[in-house]
Amino acid sequence: MNILVVGSGGREFSIGRMLKKDSVVEKLYFAPGNGATDSLGENLSIKDYNELADFAKANAIDLTIVGPEAPLVDGIVDIFKAKGLTIFGPSKEAARLEGSKVYMKNFLAKYNIPTARYIETDSIDDAFKFIDTLPTPVVVKADGLCAGKGVIIATTHDEAKIAVSEMLSGKSFGDAGKKVIVEEFLDGYELSMFAICDGKDYILLPAAQDHKRLMDNDEGPNTGGMGAYAPTPLVNEEIYQKVKERVIRPTLDGMQKEGAPFEGVLFIGLMIVNGEPITLEFNVRFGDPECEILMPLMKTPARELFYKAATGKLDELNVEFENKFAVGVVMASGNYPYSDSVPAEIVVDEIVHEDIKENTHISYAGVTKEDGILYATGGRVLVCVGLGDSIKQARDRAYMLCGQVHYVGKKLRTDIAYQAL
């Protein structure tokens, strides 16, 4: 089987890493990939989606897996399907669940899926009036794609109004902020759940918890994610059941009614308030760094899961997971998330400890390769992943691996999975 993975981050590296270990996979391609994915397969520099589809056709690609949100929102799936290719991911129409926060919130309201009280508007006056009705803090979101950074949690009404003003003027996020959502802040704990969907059926993966803030104790600005762990003990069978009945089922049924059956990864950002799951947002792809910890927990070949979902045959699959925990710690560059950092050579010590060698690995993200040397060039550089029979064991192993990785300006949190421990 020949497989193409679209994307260049740690998420795509993690998917590729699992595919590389699969004896059924003959050739593996990345478009564009990163400085480390060439150790797993072949990197392609084809940017145009039509050209990429033509390459897939010419090279007998059996399955294309799309990692990031931008190509999905741009309609890569529709282009590939129009050429008779098998591709895993939602159509352009279905990807609006992430591409427009306004569309997503209105969809939640229309199909009675529990969510926070909100207003969607491009009127500064209406936004300000609604802000004054809410207790603080107040959540302000840009409508469009902002690479996971278009959400402001304002601690005062004035701060919320400034955030709205800067978004609507185009100062904060350009066109992505020309319409905003203002919503009530929910007090509980956040979870990430991922359902692999084929339009009608789905398979729910173990619940994960992401750590968005830059610094320990959840301080500092929001980032794309500084670490994650799964499965989380903060979810019991009752919560899983509520999410299935109140969120996933009505979403799949609703998207069919909207004429845009949802295929791909439905990423549900949840706030659990007094045992009740409230939907914060949908994304239409794997979270990053959640993907890095969910992939190694797969016992069933990832290739089989993605292929069955892409061909509408999930009901034929019985998915199994490893009876283990995974913890991923993001190592970022010195100036992340404020500005770019100077490229820095990455040195990984030879790992002699057998326990670490067998139960940890690195998923590379913001890296480039020159003359065979890896350099940290992106904001989030790599993820150190540890597996274990307990969260503590997995976390200890992940941090031991972090100690083996060196580059100038390396930055990481030291408390990933603290809520579970």
Image (cartoon, rainbow, N blue to C red):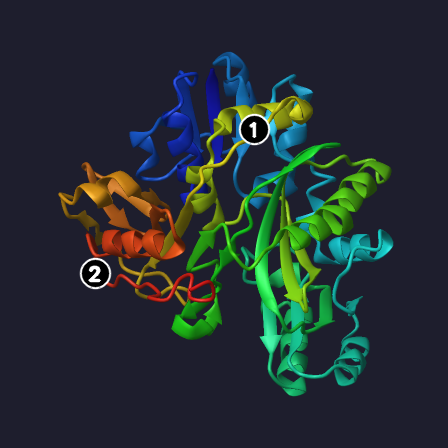
Contact (Cβ within 8 Å) of mark 2 with mark 1: no
Task: Decide: is 240 above or below 157.
Answer: above
Residue at image coords 74%, 39%: 93
- In the image, taking residue 202 as reference, residue 390 lies left or right, namely left
**Residue 165: image location, x then y, percent:** 67, 76
Alpha-carbon span between mark 2 and mark 1: 38 Å
Q: Nearer the viewer, residue 163 or 106?
A: 106
* Marking on residue 408: 2
- In the image, taking residue 182 as reference, residue 380 lies left or right, namely left
Task: Decide: is 251 above or below 203.
Answer: below
Q: Is residue 147 visible?
A: yes
Which quadrant would residue 203 be assigned to in this image? Answer: top right
Residue at image coords 37%, 56%: 330
- Element at label 2: loop
Task: Decide: is 365 above or below 313.
Answer: below
**Residue 175: image location, x then y, percent:** 65, 59
- In the image, taking residue 97 as reference, residue 389 lies left or right, namely left
Which of the two discs, 2 and 1, sits closer to the camera? 1
**Residue 247: image location, x then y, percent:** 74, 50
Estimate how packed mark 2 is, as few (under 14), some (14 to 19) or many (20 or more) residues with alpha carbons within 10 Å: some
Task: Decide: is 202 above or below 107.
Answer: above
Which of the two discs, 2 and 1, labels the residue nearer the N terminus? 1
- Under mark 2, the amino acid is Val
Q: Is residue 80 visible?
A: no
In what quadrant of the picture does the C terminus appear? bottom left
Which quadrant would residue 169 be assigned to in this image? Answer: bottom right
- In the image, taking residue 358 as reference, residue 313 lies left or right, namely right
Badge 1 is on which residue?
A: 306
**Residue 192: image location, x then y, percent:** 57, 54
Q: Nearer the viewer, residue 283 or 60?
A: 283
- Under mark 1, the amino acid is Phe
Residue at image coords 36%, 61%: 340
